[in-house]
Amino acid sequence: MDIWNWVEKLQDDLGEAGQAQSAQLLTRLTDEVCELRMDRVDALLPEARALGKTLGNPWLEVFVGHWDMRNRVGNRLEGESALGDAVALFERAHRADTVECPQSICVTQDLAACYGNIDGPGWVPERIEVCEETLARINPSWACFQCLSCEKADALLDDGNSQGALDYLDVQAGTVLAHGGKVYDSFPEMRIKILLASGRAAEALALIDVRQAEVDAEGDYEPANCTVPRKLSRAWALAQLGRDEEALASLVPFNQLSPNYRRMWAHTVALLVRNAPERNSWDLGRRLNATLAHYAEVGAHRFVIEIAGLCVDMALQRGAVWTARRHLALARQHVGQLRQDRGASDAIAAMAARIDAAPSTAALPVPAEGLLDWLVEQGEQGDGRDPEREAQWLLQGVEQRPDDAAMLDVAASALNACGAEEEAIALLWAFVERHPHEDAAPAYSLLRLLVQRGDQAGLDRLMQHYQAQVPVFALWCQAQMAHKLSDWATLEQACSALLALSPQSHGARNLLGVALMAMQRFQDAAVQYRHLTEVLEEPRSAHWDHMTAASAARDWAAVRGSAAAIGMELDSTDGPVEESFGWVIIRCTDGGEPIEYYARRTGPVTARIVENAPANRRQRVDDWVVFDAELVHPAPEDEQERERFMPTYAEVHLLESGGYAGSWLVDGVHPGEDAWSAFAEAVEARGWKLWTHSPDDYQLTDAEGDDVPLPGVLFTVAQPQEQPRLDLHRFLLDATAQWPHQLCWLRLAEACDQDAQRHLDAIERYGL
């Protein structure tokens, strides 16, 4: 059964009703989940939920809820933190108005997976029961039949019955084939998982290679949730077989992993460092600590204990006993949250025994008063600093010198670098509470950590602590948190009060400028930045900020003043600054997502966008914008690459709209340079905007020809907002009438209520 039919029908209906963006929203939501872009999913969910309420469609409510769970329970590996929502969604999906929705079956998978994340072995009977109950309601033609079969196999694996899980998959696959169905990727992927978990790496690797060969032969695009686990599985299999270099080559970088794949990554690196201790760095420990912290936060209790065991061994191998003890303490916190013990207490006891058997913490290499200088010297002479090793010495130094602000600050920094954020904050609080009269370095470090965490209660406590005796610092705390929260009114208030007490606080004045810019009070912001240009020893950065504010305020004399101060020559002497400064890329925001356009730089911090927006985006062509002078992407260090580098800047303010309506997409065979040049000139003569989006090697094939590749062209045309789109449709008909191949502008034809068949024929003939 195609469970997507109703979704596709809904999207078609939305498109016909002129709500193409709403129709695309559902596809974007599912795509982002499959591409492991978790934050983008979060950004789309409010709009998707609102769509369901607007349409009064309960099936859509279940659909969106399921994909939310795929992101949370699937990508983020949430356990206890998602259980309430997973149960509520399961109950909602089985009410009278939604029980027939195909995604009500999918919701069973979400609930079973959530139980598995919390404590897989402890919830085996319930996971199997809920899968079997739902499997009995559907037949093998449902794609869900295979998903739920994999969930049950996963439960059998957690029960210690790996062979039973494999046998069950064989039976289910046979059932699918007997009903004329096709076995999808989920079955071989689950087999690979079972084989790897049960130490049958050679069999797993063979299956991985077969599946990869099939994918390569098919040549179809695969989303990240297919490619990432296959690469990781290959790396783990190779590591189990002792083929370490090959495993390293296949290992996916940590920063490309969603939390659900970090578990496999941890098992793989644990094997790789066992034979090569030089790979076992403090930075590796930091990444694994982040994994543990996430699993603890989301209530994936069994996984915390499992990964803590790996982390303890690696920490002991590095000689970091204090780190190993942190991991042990975390594991002990979660053992009581398991539904069944099933060996967890024994695993924790074994960790404790290994830690107790490890050598005690090394003594200070030099007296405490000389430790900081010694560490700096060692870092300069060696391969850099190792905060995990240094933390053990620094903590001993702090015990001897608790009022040494510099040493305590470095110790907190080392702890934080290793992921021991709670310990770092506790150390800083202890110092701050002993020194209420001074805002020394530890106070600023504590402020920074509290702001990073968004800890409003902690910041309130810090502000109150210093309110009476160091009010400037208390206001600085308030300003930093307001900046973090984008609370511009509060930021303005805090910075103004701070400047009243301390007029020379350049940081407060800069933040005041930020707040005023965000509130579009550009002239006021320019005043603050101009003041900074007059008082700072190195005012270049302030001049750029001043030009941004002055450009947004259209104070062109002020722009020229700062430009001259930094040695930037302008041709004009009065009026708006609109000159030719070459090509740039402007990063705009559309629907909360970044999108970049080619533009012509017209001044120090202004540009006109020259690229048409995609057909489904708000039009930006010919917009005159102010941008932030800080590069979005740093310039490359290589000199040759730097010559080809085109800078990207973020839009700050729209000075003037280009006045163009949305783009219309045209696709087809290139007519030849002469015909194309004449076409482009005709478009320009009408005041329309033409932009070619296809690369130089874009090719098409004529199904009615001789299979020789033909050069293709994919372009958009944008008209001024007041012009009827039917004019463009008619122009395209006339201008391309003599071209040897029919082009396609289906969406424009449909919008003009014109015959669409010729465009559908072109799509079919040329594979557009």
Image: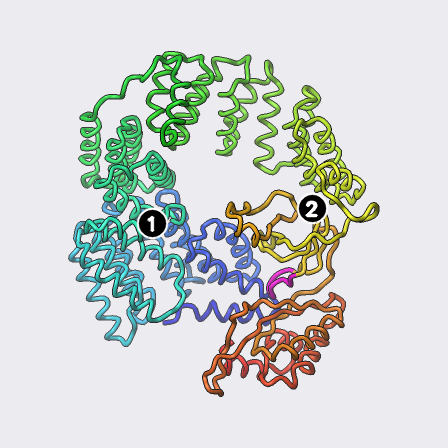
Q: Can residue 494 be seen in the rendering of this structure?
A: no
Relative to 35, residue 490 above or below: above
Q: Determine whether, in the image, residue 411 is placed left or right of residue 514.
A: left
Query: Disc 1 versus disc 2: distance between alpha carbons?
Result: 43 Å
67 part of magenta stretch: no
Label 1: state its secondary structure.
helix
Relative to 319, residue 240 above or below: below
Q: Which mark is residue 282?
A: none
**Along the viewing direction, whichever of 458 and 402 lies nearer the viewer:** 402
Residue 695, given in percent of the width and then of the height, sits at 54, 67
Q: Residue at x 47, y 82 (%)?
A: 708
**Along the viewing direction, whichever of 570 and 604 lies nearer the viewer:** 570
Q: Can residue 738 be seen in the rendering of this structure?
A: yes
In the rendered image, the quadrant that contains the N terminus is: bottom left
Q: Which mark is residue 605?
A: 2
- In the image, what residue type sits under mark 1? Tyr
Spot the residue most to the right. 574
Residue 30, given in percent of the width and then of the height, sits at 45, 60
| Residue where numbered disc 1 is placed | 261
Q: Quadrant of residue 153?
A: bottom left
Q: Quadrant of residue 493?
A: top right
Residue 65, given in percent of the width and then of the height, sits at 44, 55
- In the image, what residue type sits under mark 2? Val
Residue 40, given in percent of the width and then of the height, sits at 49, 52
Q: Residue at x 56, y 78 (%)?
A: 669
- Where does the magenta region start and end? 611-618
Q: Label 2: how many residues lie within 10 Å, few (<14), some (14-19) or many (20+)?
A: many
Q: Determine contact: label 1, label 2, CB under 8 Å.
A: no
Choose the circle earlier in sequence order: 1 or 2: 1
**Along the viewing direction, whichever of 484 and 642 lies nearer the viewer:** 642
